[in-house]
Image (cartoon, grey):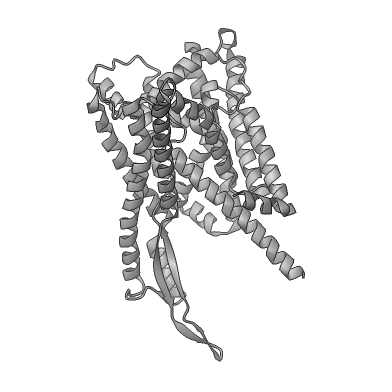
Amino acid sequence: MIKFLQNAFRVKEVRDRLLYTLGMLVVIRIGSNLPIPGVDASYLSSFFENLQASGLGFFNAITGGSFSSMSLFALSITPYITSSIIMQLLTIAVPKLEEMQKEGEDGRRKIAEYTRYLTVGLALFESTAMALGLGGQGLVLEEYRNFWGYLTVVAAMTAGSALLMWIGERITEKGVGNGISIVLLVNIVSSLPQDIMMLYYRFMAGQSVPVAAIACVIVLAVIIATVVFVLILNGAERRIPVQYSKKMQGRRMVGGQSSHIPLKVNTAGVIPVIFASSIMSMPAMVAQFFTVDYTSFGGQILMMLSSSNWFRPEAPVYSIGLILYIVLIVLFAYFYTSITFNSLEVANNMKKSGGFIPGIRPGKPTSDYLSGILSYIVFLGAAGLAVVCIIPIIASGLFSVGNLSFGGTSLIIIAGVILETIKAIESKMLVRNYKGFLND
């Protein structure tokens, strides 16, 4: 890795892009520590403890701790992620947007513009709901509980989210890798020191040297095994062989090449986990605005939906909610894959270009074959996602570790973004080598 970075910094273009990215990351960390005027941090700290108990620790992790401290970047880029998903779904449901997406660069530029507008609208809605819903309960200081005070809080949170979106797009354009993904990565990684201290105090502090050493080895082994499993899950794919028939072009015989269609096992990435976590945590989050009797039937359901109550030895019945969580992950994996991979379109494109899968007839039989293979590997990918997400939940429930930022969802994001960024740097270096070869 060190050798790779040394080679990257020797190339001026790559070095400039890396330095630009690092500079933007410094700006992000500064903004994550700038407080919003008129907000009572002490109230928010106690309120956030309840939110963490409701399974929203991951939301604070992807904001880099900005949500719990109510800093300028409290909303982080979650409005942008939500708006991107909404626009992606709309391109399937709205024919005009689907045509726009097929127009090429101009169409994608228009969709990106609509995504920005929707991001600002979502950020404005979320910040207004938070300020008005919690402001009177203590989130906003008493002297700021007026029109201009609420406007300041809402404007600061909305502007912070819009600024992060702009920074992410600038990193994509002038830096390396996908800017939005890198913003997520640096926010999650910024919480790692706190998580390491949490593990130390839970398993090693106050223990004898042999016991502390054994605990350290076990913790490291679990973390390393989980990381390796995530890397395997991200890189695993099923390659469908494709043969192209020969045909005459002028006086020459062309075609006859062999290729393959790579079908990733984890086709939907981390999206199913984010969707499932959002749905599971939403009822508990809304309940924070009201007085809830957790001994009632409705209160018991809320306790089951909270991942922080799963695998608790004193209350095993709450782990029933885990079944719903796994089912949601599998359903969203199939749903997201179905809207991002059109097997019939792939089969038709293969048929037009003279390609076929050996032993499978072109057209609909090829589409059915791809759908069958995809349904099988999507289930494997969803099962892998569920395993990665359950491991930290088990640790939290059985050993009272608390909410770790490098849980299953975060590990998938970290591994995916790092691999994606390394590939982006390698491609920049490869383009530079080609340019140098041609100039010689």
Q: Is residue 70 left or right of residue 57?
A: right
Q: Where is residue 259 drawn, in percent x and y?
A: 46, 72
Q: Is residue 105 left or right of residue 435?
A: left
The residue shown at (33%, 52%) is: 380
Q: Quadrant of residue 347?
A: bottom left
Most foreground residue, 400 or 267: 400
Q: Where is residue 224 drawn, in percent x and y?
A: 43, 42
Q: Would residue 209 be seen by someone viewing this image from the given angle?
A: yes
The image shows residue 256, relative to residue 259, as above or below, that is below
Q: Where is residue 101 drawn, in percent x and y?
A: 53, 55
Most foreground residue, 23 or 338: 23
The residue shown at (52%, 13%) is: 42
Q: Residue furthest top?
A: 143
The image shows residue 264, relative to residue 434, as above or below, that is above
The residue shown at (56%, 91%) is: 251
Q: Residue furthest bottom?
A: 251
Quadrant of the image for the C terminus? Answer: bottom right
Q: Where is residue 24 drawn, in percent x and y?
A: 67, 38
Q: Would residue 306 be seen by someone viewing this image from the given angle?
A: no
The residue shown at (61%, 56%) is: 426
Q: Quadrant of residue 370?
A: bottom left
Q: How many marks?
A: 0
